[in-house]
Image (cartoon, rainbow, N blue to C red):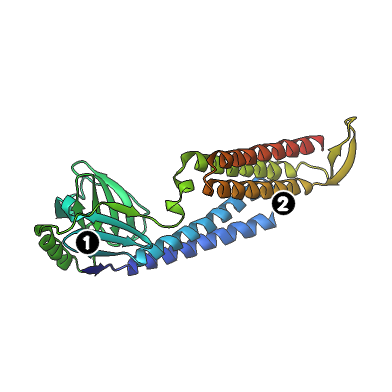
């Protein structure tokens, strides 16, 4: 038995958020191009990139909200959110209760947009709660199990509660195991490896710091700066002040290459080699950072 949700409010609020994020990103990008390279323009570019990432995440989340549905039989209760599925055995369900009964004590961590109730929370009596809903607590029911509870908001809440109670009263005919299926990147070994995430994130952070150094020091550079020194320590090649951004571009290419190489090695079950590739990428970023600082100090 399939129960749909009403995602109209969630899609509308998400679309408005996308427009707002897009306008903020566009304004930041325009301002960054109108002023000389400084830390201010760097921060504006960071905000523009963050706005693009936010829009991508908003669209991805709206896709999941639009496809949110629930299916029910006497053996299992299945929540579908985008391509992900959460399968709850009916044998583990203790009861179903109105969500407004727990509203007072519930602590919910959610994006504050109307209809965006795909989030996590806790309650003193129930413990962990995972919400897969497009309506507020007043329009939700909570499926209670020993380990974690689930907040849901089918379009016809009364019909859903009645159907759920009916099937809960029946004895399961098959043994079903709990499963949380998340296809795509979230189910990959790389995504679940803490060290991999740490090394990739650290490489990106070091590159951002390198960019900050380049933008922050650009205003104080002369038009011509030394780019290379011979064995005697004498300058043998000059370049424009913008060359510091050329170093950053090369550093980014090296970072992208090492990140891709590490991912390929990790996927081939060569975890140590993948770690080494990502660690090498961090060292390359540090090398370019020292080179940029040396060039700027020499200027």
- Residue 221 lies, in percent from the top left, at 79, 42
Q: Which residue extends farthest top?
A: 232
Pointer 1 or 2: first along the chain = 2
Front one among 83 and 45: 83
Label disc, if present, on residue 36 of the rendered structure: 2
Q: Quadrant of residue 140?
A: bottom left
Residue 61 is left or right of residue 220, and the answer is left
> Which disc, if any, is residue 252?
none
287 to the left or right of 163:
right
In the rendered image, the vertical position of residue 144 relative to residue 164, given as above or below: above
The residue shown at (63%, 46%) is: 258
The residue drawn where x is 57% and y is 42% is 274
Identified at 20% across, 47% down, the residue is 104
Label 2: how many Cα within 10 Å (few below 14, some 14–19, many 20+): some
Q: Nearer the viewer, mark 1 or mark 2?
A: 1
Residue 92 picture location, percent across and down: 18, 50
The residue carrying mark 1 is 139
State the SS at label 2.
loop
> Image point 61% across, 41% down: which residue?
277
Mark pair 1, 2: CA separation: 52 Å
Total numbered badges shown on the rendered structure: 2
Q: Is residue 110 left or right of residue 75?
A: right
Residue 280: which quarter of the image?
Answer: top right
Q: Nearer the viewer, residue 177 or 193?
A: 177
Residue 240, given in percent of the width and then of the height, sits at 83, 48
For the residues labelled 1 and 2, say whether their Cβ atoms are less than 8 Å apart.
Answer: no
Assign a secondary structure to mark 1.
helix
């Amino acid at each position: 038995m399939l129960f749909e949700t009403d995602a109209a409010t969630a899609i509308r609020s998400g679309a408005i958020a996308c427009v707002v994020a897009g306008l903020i990103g566009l304004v930041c990008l325009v301002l960054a191009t109108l002023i000389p390279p400084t830390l201010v323009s760097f921060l504006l570019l960071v905000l523009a990139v963050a706005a693009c990432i936010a829009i991508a995440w908003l669209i991805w989340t709206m896709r999941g909200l639009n496809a949110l549905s629930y299916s029910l039989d006497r053996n299992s209760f299945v929540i579908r959110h985008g391509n992900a599925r959460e399968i709850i055995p009916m044998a583990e369900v203790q009861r179903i209760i109105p969500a407004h009964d727990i509203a007072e004590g519930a602590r919910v961590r959610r994006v504050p947009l109307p209809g965006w109730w795909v989030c996590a929370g806790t309650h003193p009596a129930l413990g962990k709660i995972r919400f897969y809903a497009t309506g507020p607590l007043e329009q939700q029911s909570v499926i209670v199990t020993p380990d974690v509870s689930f907040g849901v908001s089918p379009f016809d809440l009364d019909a859903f509660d009645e159907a759920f109670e009916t099937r809960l009263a029946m004895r399961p005919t098959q043994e079903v195991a709990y499963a949380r299926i998340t296809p795509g990147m979230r189910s990959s070994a790389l995504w679940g490896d803490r060290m991999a995430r740490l090394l990739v994130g650290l490489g990106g952070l070091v590159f951002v710091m390198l960019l900050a150094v380049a933008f922050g020091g650009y205003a104080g550079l002369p038009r011509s700066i030394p780019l290379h020194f011979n064995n005697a320590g004498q300058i043998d090649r000059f370049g424009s002040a913008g060359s510091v951004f050329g170093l950053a571009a090369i550093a980014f290419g090296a970072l992208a290459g090492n990140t891709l190489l590490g991912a390929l090695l990790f996927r081939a079950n060569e975890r140590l080699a993948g770690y080494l590739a990502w660690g090498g990428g961090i060292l390359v970023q540090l090398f370019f950072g020292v080179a940029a600082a040396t060039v700027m100090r020499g200027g």
